[in-house]
């Protein structure tokens, strides 16, 4: 436990991940259902007696329920990666939540006013039922039998979970990247239950190059012989080699080319001279990628990775809700919408947010878009708190 | 043989790849030397009695000596990939050279005037000595014992090869990407032998993100268990899974995001409905990548791939020739320089050419840079002949 006296200002303090077992099978878009779904979650702040101050925070591909504060239970390896991980303070191995900069007293999602709920999403590997979980029908891990899920399935799971907490309405649903997709899906599929959504560095449908990067990452994993068709659990082997490559691809797409150049340049690990090696890192950037891959495979499950990657490429609200039209897909939205995009984000470029803004505005819906000038690419949503906090606070009616 | 009557205008016709064995060991930057180096080459046009009309064409990572015309010997699978491969005419399985649009009578490298020489580069897998070649010391493939080579080594090999042809001076050295690096290296290391260089979609030193993509591609190959430390030759297994992933990464970096969106969008292979699959291509772009990977691994050697990839990340003329200064590195150049870059090329962005131009101009050297507005990314150097041909012809003094 972090004692209150040593907490940095704005921290929610020491937190613990808890679990809820859904009472009924969860129906899925693919036509199947999942029995005995468990959801891992954390909460920050206090639920108002009127239950009208709930903000649901949704995480991105590699996140988990631990969004804020210091986890007493989490492993020393933070769930924040790369540039974001380096922003951790040196809190004696207590992992800081992945969106700690945004959640807490006085922050964007202000826990003095709101009750913030964060879950590990469906298909995850950090406490919520996913491919590495035990299939109650067989007593062993789902593996390849775990269904192919969608963002709508994640939202369905979150809805069922909130029912268990006795929460009907949401003051806001918020998230970045895949988390922003969930927020958008909430506003479309549950228009009467969502007052507002905060969609950051996200899209209504990933563009072609983004689909390609995700396909490449999945290929890297599934071509690893240790993948074993997805049934590697309990075999003593996991597709760590492929996962490492997938993570490297992801990492480079999360950052901007200029930020990489500024940070690493062409610096050699050995100083001025090359060492003529193909199988050892020679440039600092190579060493960095190697390190990122190595730490990721220790904490993340490949089966989860391929399913979440697939879900976020499938996500396409025009297709799923509008018969091909984004305007029609967003026609039923009632939530106020805050869109934030980042100038240097080439994986989820601002144009997608512009398209969402135009479709909502065309439908007469209240929407605001801010394209922030920031250098770090897609990772900005985890790094650029200073610019985001005032926007989100104002949007949420906070002083 | 393509009969003359059926040849398209501007074709050099049917060609054959020939071979030269270097008479002396080839010294390398790493301190080792290679014995009994063989060089695969093709020539187009006629060598002038004065031997002053020679243009050396240097290929990029996945190219070979077959730069122009129809190869009677080459496999039906063209050495042109992707968007470029689709530009092949339907010449009954006779593979068209990778730069056929630029080389031939009346074209940029006009064979009515110039004698164009094209070699497979050192370390290659298409006839020139490389990791898959037999090591004369052991009688089996070099494999992991093949040295780590540099662009300067490639140029050294080309120099020794041209000696065998009795060619001392070069009217021009030309190439795109890694080929452009060789041209630049020629101008620096052999200033008295090169009249001009044509450096297209290339750089004096790859930027950080480019270094990262190459590292990821090599990792994909070397993490494949079939890589076997580089000694997979003769084992009946090759790292095809990893090579496929490497090729997918390469492919996406060679094309621009807008060109991918325009070409593939988010079209599903099955029409309107997703099929809920993680291990089958679902989007057209996924199917395209799968196809590109599959055809590449059939024609290219992984050992060559990792070495050429390493060589092009090492390439840094400021480091190797200028004590860290690009200005100093280019101070001894005597060749006239034509630089061409493409607006949509994010792997070899135009800024690198601008830097070369500035350094040459600062040294009082004749240089011209053209940044062409073209949509296809790095692959433009293989696709945008219409814009390049008049620039190159004028630069070479052709009408």
Image (cartoon, coloured by chain):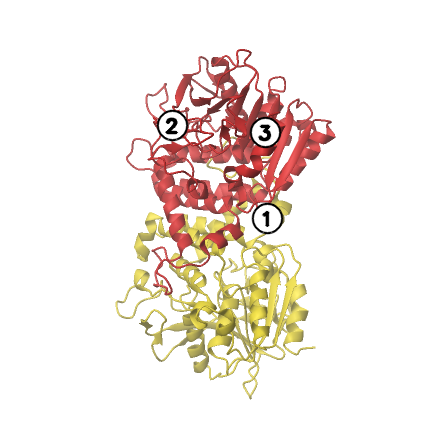
Chain colours: A red, B yellow
Label 1 marks a residue whose chain is B
Q: CA distance from mark 1 to mark 2?
A: 50 Å
Say few, some or many: other residues with alpha carbon within 10 Å of mark 1 (under 14 / 14 to 19 / 20 or more).
Answer: many
Q: How many marks?
A: 3
Q: Residue at x 52, y 23 (%)?
A: A56
- Of residues B210 and A34, the one nearer the viewer is B210
Q: Which residue is under mark 1?
A: B257
Instruction: Between residue A292 and residue B63, name the one nearer to us.
Output: A292
Residue bearing the label numbered 3? A393
Q: Which mark is residue A5?
A: 2
Q: Horizontally, is B187 left or right of A283 in the view?
A: right
CB of mark 3 within 8 Å of CB of mark 2?
no
Which element is circle 2 on? helix
Image height check: is A91 above or below B315? above
Q: In the figure, residue B264 lies in which quadrant?
A: top right
Nearer to us in this view, B300 or B11: B300
Camera-near label (3 vs 2) is 2
- Pointer 3 chain: A
């Amino acid at each position: 436990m972090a004692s209150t006296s040593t907490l940095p200002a704005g921290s929610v303090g020491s937190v613990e991940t808890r679990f809820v077992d859904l009472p009924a099978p969860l129906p899925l878009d693919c036509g199947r259902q999942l029995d005995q779904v468990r959801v891992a979650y954390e909460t920050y702040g206090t639920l108002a007696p009127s239950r009208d101050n709930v903000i649901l925070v949704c995480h991105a591909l590699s996140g988990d329920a631990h969004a804020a504060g210091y986890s007493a239970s989490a492993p020393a390896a933070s769930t924040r990666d790369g540039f974001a991980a380096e922003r951790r303070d040196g809190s004696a191995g207590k992992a800081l939540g992945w969106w700690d900069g945004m959640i807490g007293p006085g922050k964007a999602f202000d826990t003095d006013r709101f009750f913030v709920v964060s879950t590990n999403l469906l298909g995850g590997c950090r406490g919520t039922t996913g491919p590495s979980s035990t299939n109650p029908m067989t007593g062993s891990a789902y593996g390849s039998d775990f269904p192919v899920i969608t963002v709508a399935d994640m939202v369905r799971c979150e809805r069922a979970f909130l029912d268990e907490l006795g929460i009907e309405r949401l003051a806001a649903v918020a998230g970045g990247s895949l988390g922003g997709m969930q927020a958008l899906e909430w506003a479309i599929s549950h228009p009467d239950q969502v007052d507002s959504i905060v969609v950051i560095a996200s899209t209504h449908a990933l563009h072609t190059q983004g689909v390609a990067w995700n396909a490449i990452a999945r290929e890297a994993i599934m071509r690893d012989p240790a993948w074993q068709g997805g049934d590697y659990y309990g075999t003593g082997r996991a597709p760590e080699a492929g996962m490492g490559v997938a993570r490297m691809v992801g990492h480079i797409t999360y950052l901007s080319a200029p930020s990489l150049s500024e940070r690493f340049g062409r610096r050699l690990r050995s100083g001025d001279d090359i060492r003529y090696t193909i199988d050892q890192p020679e440039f600092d950037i190579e060493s960095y990628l190697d390190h990122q891959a190595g730490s990721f495979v220790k904490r993340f499950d490949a089966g989860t990775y391929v399913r979440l990657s697939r879900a976020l490429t499938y996500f396409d609200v025009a297709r799923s809700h509008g018969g091909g039209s984004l305007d029609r897909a967003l026609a039923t939205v009632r939530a106020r919408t805050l869109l934030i995009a980042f100038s240097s984000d080439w994986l989820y470029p601002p144009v997608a947010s512009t398209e969402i803004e135009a479709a909502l505005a065309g439908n007469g819906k209240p929407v605001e878009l801010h394209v922030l000038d920031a250098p770090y690419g897609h990772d900005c949503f985890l790094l650029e708190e200073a610019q985001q906090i005032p926007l989100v606070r104002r949007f949420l009616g906070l002083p």
